Every structure is written in structure tokens, then in C-alpha cells.
């Protein structure tokens, strides 16, 4: 075949190898994008069905349901439970004064459904305390570099005090590596 023409043979082998590399690289990017885009859903394994405002086109622009709409969902026959989930972008100021963009997730006040299942440090029941937040492990390491994992660190979310009471392991998000979790009612205070 092309064994006698080394230049063409080498070009053919390198071309096939490079195209294989490009296909695998693009496949990896695609899988990464899809995985990160659905991270909010993956981190809430308790929910079988998600109900959102009709205007929501993707998970990065969530508009919370009004309480009346949530009540209508709870009244649908066959629905065992329905809880609110809040998602917003906030600016945080760390103890050393740096500003970072982060994601704020508000979980149900009574059941705390919406938290990632894996708690690395702390107790999720402490989220019921005033100004209490849980932070993602990756977010903790980004904000408090070179510090061991510990509870009690203070940050400002939109110029309001937040005390870290738990560190959780969550899936990487599409928009931010820093994710804070708090009660739904507390999340509304941080963003209003």
C-alpha cells in the first residue's frame, strides 16, 4: 500500500491520529458541559420531578415559584411533597477583603431538601441558626486558601454576614466553583 512512500504513510498515520485526538477532545468537552449544566439536579437526588416557572429556559436562570404556585403543585393528586429551591448569583467578600462571584442555593427551611447528600464537615441541622451557610468544599478552598477545613469562618454575601457551619461536597457547577447553601428564607434575605 503506502509502505513504500514513507511521507504519504506518515502523513496518513498522523492525520488519523490527530483526527482521533480532536474527536476525543471534543467529546470530553461535550461531556463536561452536559455534566456541569445538570449539576443542580444531580445534587438534589430526592426530587423526582422539577416544577419551574414557564419562563425558565435553562437551569442557570431559575426564577423561583411564588408561594401560591407552590401550593397548587402540592395540591396535585399524587404529589407527595413539594419544596421551594432558590438559586441566585451573589458577590462575596472574604475575611481578607477579596471579592468573588458565587452561587447561592436556598433549600427548604424545614426539611433542608436541596443540600448535597455528602457533608464533609459540620452538621446540616446547624443551618437553622441565624446567618448560617454551608459552603462547597471547592469553594472553601478557593476562598480560604492554605487554611485547613474548619467551621466558623465568616464571609459577607451581598454585604450581609454569613457564618460557615458546614462544608459539603457538591458537583462542579457550570458558572461558579463557589457555592453557598442556606435556608430558603435566609437566601431571600441575602438577595433582597
Image (tube, rainbow, N blue to C red):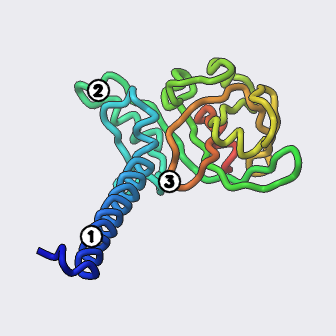
Mark 3 packing: few (<14 Cα in 10 Å), some, or many (20+)? Answer: some
Nearer to us in this view, 80 or 34: 34
Label 1 sits on a secondary structure element that is helix
> Residue lying farthest front?
4
Image quarter in which the N terminus is found = bottom left
Q: From the viewer's perspective, is 30 left or right of 39?
A: left
The residue that mark 1 highlights is 13
Q: Position of residue 44 (x, y in %)?
A: 44, 32
Nearer to us in this view, 184 or 39: 39
* Residue 79: assigned label: 2
Q: Position of residue 71 (x, y in %)?
A: 39, 34
Q: Residue at x 51, y 30 (%)?
A: 116
Label 2 sits on a secondary structure element that is loop
Nearer to us in this view, 144 or 59: 144
Mark 2 packing: few (<14 Cα in 10 Å), some, or many (20+)? Answer: few
The mark lying in front, picked from 3 and 2, is 3
Q: Position of residue 52 (x, y in %)?
A: 38, 47
Q: From the viewer's perspective, is 6 left or right of 173?
A: left
Q: Residue at x 66, y 31 (%)?
A: 134
Q: Position of residue 5 (x, y in %)?
A: 21, 81
Label 3 sits on a secondary structure element that is loop
Q: CA gap, disc 3 to disc 2?
A: 30 Å
Query: Which comes before the other along the chain, label 3 or label 2?
Result: 2
84 shown above or below 122: below
Q: From the viewer's perspective, is 45 left or right of 133?
A: left
65 shown above or below 73: below
> Residue lying farthest left?
1
Query: Which comes before the other along the chain, label 1 or label 2?
Result: 1
Mark 1 packing: few (<14 Cα in 10 Å), some, or many (20+)? Answer: few
> Residue lying farthest right?
96
Amino acid at each position: 500500500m503506502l509502505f513504500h512512500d514513507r511521507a504519504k504513510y506518515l502523513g496518513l498515520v498522523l492525520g488519523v491520529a490527530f483526527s482521533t485526538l480532536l474527536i476525543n477532545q471534543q467529546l470530553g468537552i461535550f461531556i463536561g458541559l452536559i455534566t456541569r449544566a445538570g449539576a443542580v439536579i444531580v445534587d438534589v437526588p430526592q426530587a423526582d420531578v422539577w416544577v419551574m416557572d414557564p419562563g425558565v429556559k435553562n437551569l442557570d436562570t431559575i426564577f423561583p415559584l411564588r408561594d401560591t404556585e407552590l401550593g397548587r403543585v402540592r395540591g396535585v393528586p399524587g404529589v407527595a411533597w413539594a419544596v421551594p429551591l432558590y438559586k441566585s448569583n451573589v458577590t462575596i467578600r472574604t475575611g481578607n477583603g477579596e471579592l468573588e462571584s458565587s452561587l447561592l442555593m436556598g433549600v427548604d427551611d424545614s426539611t433542608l431538601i436541596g443540600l448535597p447528600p455528602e457533608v464533609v464537615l459540620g452538621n446540616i441541622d446547624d443551618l437553622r441558626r441565624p446567618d448560617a451557610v454551608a459552603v462547597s468544599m471547592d469553594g472553601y478552598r478557593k476562598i480560604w486558601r492554605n487554611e485547613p477545613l474548619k467551621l466558623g469562618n465568616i464571609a459577607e454575601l451581598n454585604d450581609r454576614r454569613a457564618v460557615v457551619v458546614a462544608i459539603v461536597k457538591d458537583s462542579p457547577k457550570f458558572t461558579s466553583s463557589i457555592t453557598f447553601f442556606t435556608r430558603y428564607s435566609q437566601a431571600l434575605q441575602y438577595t433582597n
